[in-house]
Image (cartoon, grey):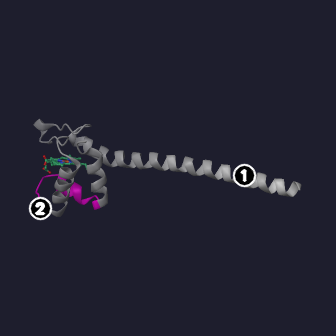
């Protein structure tokens, strides 16, 4: 009798503990994923400004007028060499295609 209750109690504790643990892990994953995306995109702010406004006088174009799709097209063109540039070709080559998608989604005009 006691053993039966004990077994149930242990199972319940395990179940509650596990579901709590897994939802916390999911929340942490989402947070880490957001940080990762923002981290990738923050590199661009050095030249294009925090909100993509650019420093047009300094030859740094504004990029906050581009949609994610337009931005991705330009980034891929820089990477493939289809579009020339001083800085962007080298920079774009440093990212995987997947990372370029993430960056364009993060920075593109919503
Ligand atoms: C070191 C400065 C610098 C950094 C960092 C930088 N850019 Fe650029 N970006 C430029 C310059 C300069 C140009 C003009 C093209 C060229 O000369 O390479 C440009 C052009 C662009 C263009 C084309 C804009 C248009 O009007 O067609 C896009 C899109 C772009 N950058 C996106 C990005 C993204 C996304 C990042 C971050 C991964 C980034 N840039 C990081 C300097 C920079």
Mark whose residue sits in front, 1 or 2: 1
**Is residue 31 toward the left or the right of residue 104 in the image?**
right
Q: Is residue 96 visible?
A: no
Classify 56 as above or below 98.
above
Q: Is mark 1 on a helix, strand or loop?
A: helix
Residue visible at 23% across and 60% down?
93
Residue wearing tag 1: 12
On the image, the x and y values in percent for residue 35 come to 40, 45
**Is residue 62 toward the left or the right of residue 38 in the image?**
left
On the image, the x and y values in percent for residue 32 come to 45, 48
Residue range in magenta is: 82-97
Residue visible at 61% across and 47% down?
20
Residue visible at 73% across and 55% down?
11
Q: Please report contact status of discs 1 and 2: CB closer than 8 Å, yes or no.
A: no
In the image, the residue with mark 1 has its CB under 8 Å from the nearest atom of ligand 1: no
Quadrant containing the C terminus is top left
Query: In the image, is residue 90 part of the stretch drawn in magenta?
Result: yes
**Is residue 41 toward the left or the right of residue 86 in the image?**
right
Classify 92 as above or below 59.
below
Residue 53 got which mark?
none
Residue wearing tag 2: 82
């Amino acid at each position: 009798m006691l053993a039966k209750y004990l077994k149930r109690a242990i199972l319940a504790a395990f179940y509650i503990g596990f579901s709590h643990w897994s939802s916390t892990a999911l929340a942490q994953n989402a947070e880490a994923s957001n940080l990762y995306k923002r981290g990738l995109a923050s590199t661009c702010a050095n030249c294009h400004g925090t909100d993509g406004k650019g420093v047009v006088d300094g030859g740094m174009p504004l990029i906050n007028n581009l949609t994610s799709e337009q931005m991705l097209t330009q980034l891929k063109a820089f990477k493939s060499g289809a579009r020339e540039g001083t800085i962007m070709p080298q920079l774009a080559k440093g990212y995987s295609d997947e990372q370029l998608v993430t960056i364009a989604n993060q920075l593109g005009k919503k």
